[in-house]
Image (cartoon, grey):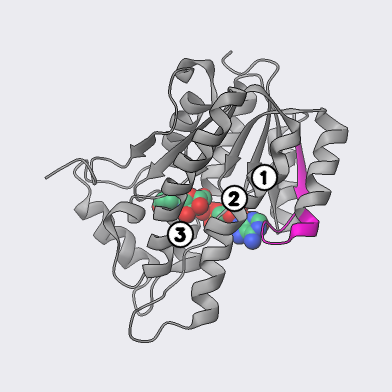
Amino acid sequence: MKLEGKKALITGGNSGIGFATARLFIHEGAEVAITGRDQKTLDAAVKELGLKAVAYRADVTDSNARADLFSKIGQRFGSLDIIFANAGIAGATPIGSADEAVFENIIRVNLTSVFFTVQAALPLLNDGSSIILNSSVIGSLGSPGRAAYAASKAGVRGMARAIASELSPRNIRVNVVAPGAIKTPIWSRGSTPPKKADELTAEWAAATPLGRLGEADEIAKAVLFLASDDSSYVQSVELFVDGGIVGSP
Ligand code: NDP
């Protein structure tokens, strides 16, 4: 098992990519704390994940909730070896009509909160810890109507490089996973009007060289690589897991 004895935090672990990663981490021997805002899906997730999982309801944008979260994780686990900063939202911000509050909220959830989650976790992080931030191919490619999302995800890449330099002396690794289009509930939560989720995902599948959307489990496997000692000399990279979207001409 690749994560025997390790303790991990996965934000947004009650859905999609975060949940698939929690399931794989536990299969590989880790204890996992998952977070999200929705108590019902947190309860359902922890029931499915079993005794090595614990769920905490916490909004990543709320500094008091973050402090409370790490206090509880400290009491339960004592320390942490892995953080997967995965919670995120999509949302439409077309240049002609985007609302400032919507724009700022996307940046706050996807970028600012990632930074302050890592900051709040620092006292708990063991020597040799691995931090993985969830970006997106959209951070490199852009996408019509998604300026705030693209900016937030490009920001995550830059931020990872800065944090990696700062934390290398503590032997903490910081890397980024950048998924392509993955089958998760995010499409129906944040599709760009007037396009429906089905229409958007069909467009992405057609634009992906491998000709299909990815599965959440396929991202989880890449996160496992970055979280485990298999990547012990991998620092400050962005790993695209995207069916070839970014790498193809
Ligand atoms: P989901 O919508 O399934 O998951 C999003 C998760 O984020 C949920 O668990 C949600 O929990 C949590 N979340 C959202 N806002 C907050 C908040 N304010 N505080 C705490 N938790 C929050 O989508 P995915 O699994 O697809 O998304 C996971 C990550 O992957 C995101 O960062 C997304 O940008 C990224 N990604 C996804 C791609 C895809 O095609 N699916 C492609 C590229 C990147 P709750 O609702 O309970 O708050």
Ligand 1 shown in quarter: bottom right
| Residue 130 % position (x, y) | 57, 28
Residue designated by label 1: 119
Residue designated by label 2: 115
| Residue 123 % position (x, y) | 75, 35
Q: Is residue 47 above or below residue 78?
A: below
Q: Secondary structure at mark 2?
A: helix
* Precedes in sequence: disc 3 or disc 1: 1
- Region of the chain picked out in magenta, as a range: 54-65
Residue 68 placement, left or right of 32: right
Question: CA gap, disc 3 to disc 1?
Answer: 18 Å
Residue designated by label 3: 152
Q: Residue at x 80, y 37 (%)?
A: 73
Q: Secondary structure at mark 3?
A: helix
Q: Residue at x 58, y 22 (%)?
A: 171
Q: Name the amino acid type tagged 1.
A: Gln
Q: Is mark 1 in CB contact (under 8 Å) with mark 2?
A: yes
Q: Name the amino acid type tagged 2.
A: Phe
Mark 3 or mark 2, whichever is nearer to me: 2
Q: Is mark 1 within 8 Å of ligand 1?
A: no
Q: Residue at x 88, y 34 (%)?
A: 75
Q: Which residue is situated farthest in the right direction here?
A: 75
